[in-house]
Image: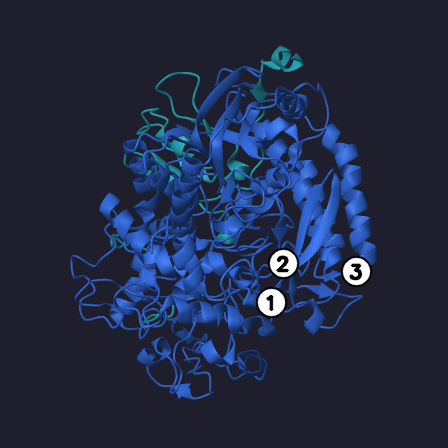
Amino acid sequence: MEAKKYNKAYATPAFAPNLPVIINEEFCTGCNKCVDICRMDVLLPNPEKGKPPIVMYPEECWYAGCCVGACPEEGAIWLEYPINMRMNWKRKESGKMYRIGMKDPLPPNPKPPVG
Amino acid sequence: MDYKFEWPYKVNYDKEHSFSADILVIGAGLAGSMAAIEAAKRGKKVMVVDKAGIERSGSGGAGIDHWNFACSNPCCKISPEEMIEEEVEKASGYRGEYIIGHCNYIAMKESYETLLDIEKMGLRFRDEKNEFAGADFRDDETKMMFAYDYKNKYSIRLKGGWRLKPILYKEMKKRKVDLYEHIMITGLLNEGGIPGAKIVGATGVNVRTGEFYIFQAKATILSTSAPGGMWIFSTDLLGSSSVFFDPNNCGDGHAIAWKAGAKFTCLETSRKEGGGFQYAAYGTGNVHNTFYPCSLVDDDGKEIPWIDRDGKVLDNFKERTVPAANQKMFIQSGPQQYATQNPRPIPDLPERIRKGEFKLPLYSDFPGMPELERRAMWGLMVGNEGKTRMLYMQYAKAGFDPDKDMLQAPVMPPEEYSFRPWWHGIAPSQWREASFFAGNIITDWDLKTNLEGLYAAGAITGCGGAAGATATGRYAGRKVVEYIDKTSGDSQINREQVEEEKKKVYAPVTREKGLVWKDLRSGLARIMQDYCGEYKHENTLKIGLDMLKSVQESEAQQVVANNPHELWRILECLNRITLGEMIMFSSLERKASCRAMDFKRLDYPEIDPEEWKKFIVISLKEGERKSETLPLKYWLNSPYASSYLENYKKYSGLE
């Protein structure tokens, strides 16, 4: 079969409007749990063992957040919506508008999801 | 681009692996996983294959917020027979009378028992910690929590649903199911290599290493998704999030089964998607689905009234969660027939916005709702549904607090504020989606297809959603075991068919230069938009079919894969060409417009004429597209009994 001749494979980084997957190298141990759980294979393992994964296909991200859920290290991986997906909310009492990404944001709400 | 990154996985195109077992399951979403568990429980050796990592793969892999059709739960006041009657006879369900009745009835009969099975595997879906004690939607004895119609309690709010798929994954491992991850199935294998003959296995390619897989089994369960993303594609704006559905839902199962000779129906169904290039799903002010029945206010804080089906204004929140006077039940979503119409915001809201009575933007008024209701909506449902657990975390990190904050709805033209799912943004009418459960493989009461040895479960049968997928998966797993126990003789894989398949699969890696898969995919989306858009016509559909053929002959032969990931996406595009052909052919064959399918023919504008109330069934025979029809409710026609319950008793293997 001719296909074998083409076993030298490579990838070229793709364009995305934003950086959906943000890896904090300080906390990432390079365990690649996020690589294997991603439904789209957005991430590739770093050729250097123990180093953070490569965000090779950010434009294929579905924002499912499975990578964030699977990460054993607090703060090592995070998702960010593009600006054009960010919706406002209004504090009922003050009437003030807020949104993800604004200057002087609210303090985080520590209440976890149910279950 | 100059920069090239060396592929980190060891690539070995053409290297062959062969495996065999009793049963092959294609697609390890909720349906496939449950089918595998059920068959393994009955002592069979099962292989499960998925394109993605199985722990979180499939439409429900990222999480689940509610469990529909739980008619046999002890709190439910609607029997499966009453529910299916509403959905099919009275066309109250999402797809009206074109819902696939037997599959959905199976879900109504078994989805609660399926949930109890999963509870035994470790899912804690009850309010054990009494966080919701005293809520109207909670049953104190069973500690179950319900959504939508609190009187009839047919839909369970699924605490912990975010963990559902990993639980099934663990259970499959525990039961020694052979898991083949990151492998895309590229074709079904027929006995003797002849399309239409018995299914004896399938071929696949590893999307990381490019290695080739041959699976042989006594029977196969096809549990792939409903097709998505046919009309809409642009990764530049929102990544894969430009589609609402799981972007891995490409119609792979449809394409491979069609080529193998399976019959399909309802492929002409599609819908304008509120999204396209939408906001994050459930990240905007809303009153639908998860957010039902959210309080809604305008920019001055003026409340938008809710009414019941008779137009009576509902003064308190509680009234939105129970049927109207003299109404047995309501169904949240669907075509809104009077019998089951749910309470809703005033239908003349668009007009009243125009007149200036309500000022945009509108907001979901969480603080204005009872505390446990908003906690159930945001903390429980958004906190457990696929993708939206991430949304919950993102919003929480940015300080969003449903106890204090009102979530804004997108600002849209007034007419968009009629009661329709969902307010996530608007798109032109040609940006369509195959929508929920469109394009169904024909199955009998055993969930067996017209091909010997091939069964189906989940969305591809017309019964999706977490409850429908797992229930039909469980049923198919049971039936397939019954089948192989009474079938003798080994089936042989035809080497010629394997070689043909390999040639097709690897062609894109043997090209030095050519097109990128995204170009092909967006080109296909354009063909769908233009020639199979909101309004269809014999002439334009025929041109569309010609264009698909032309692209297949030309551009599809020029796409290049520089690595196995790109090969994966290219093979999906090739399946999409086949799926496009199936959709356009079905659309040509339905020579009438149809309300439930949102199907509009310019040349046959009459909606639902009596003689066209039937299913269009398509298949490929000796390379030619064939169409036939089946009457509505064909699952209650000869050779089957005339009632759901009788058939169920005869076929389910349980009663």
Measured Cα–Cα span from mark 1 to mark 2: 8 Å
Task: Give the image location of residue B376, x and y in percent.
Answer: 29, 63
Name the residue that disc number 1 marks.
B596
How far apart are the two marked residues, 3 and 1, measured between alpha carbons?
Answer: 18 Å
Give, as a three-letter code, the residue at label 3: His
SS assignment at label 1: loop
Quick check: A110 left or right of B290? left
**B338 w.r.t. B195: above or below:** below
- Quarter location, residue B625: top right
Percent of width and height locating residue B256: 61, 37
Q: Point out which mark residue B349 bears.
A: none
Q: Pointer 3: residues within 10 angstroms few (<14), some, or many (20+)?
A: many
Residue type at mark 1: give it.
Answer: Ala
Image point 38% across, 74% down: which residue?
B295
- Give the mark count: 3
The mark nearer the N terminus, 3 or 1, is 3
Q: Which mark is residue B537?
A: 3
Residue of label 2: B269
Residue lying at 32% horizontally and 38% vertically, measured from the top left: B42
Q: Quadrant of the C terminus of chain B?
A: bottom left
Query: Along the line of sight, which residue is nearer the eye, B561 or B226?
Result: B226
Q: Residue at x 70, y 20 (%)?
A: B511
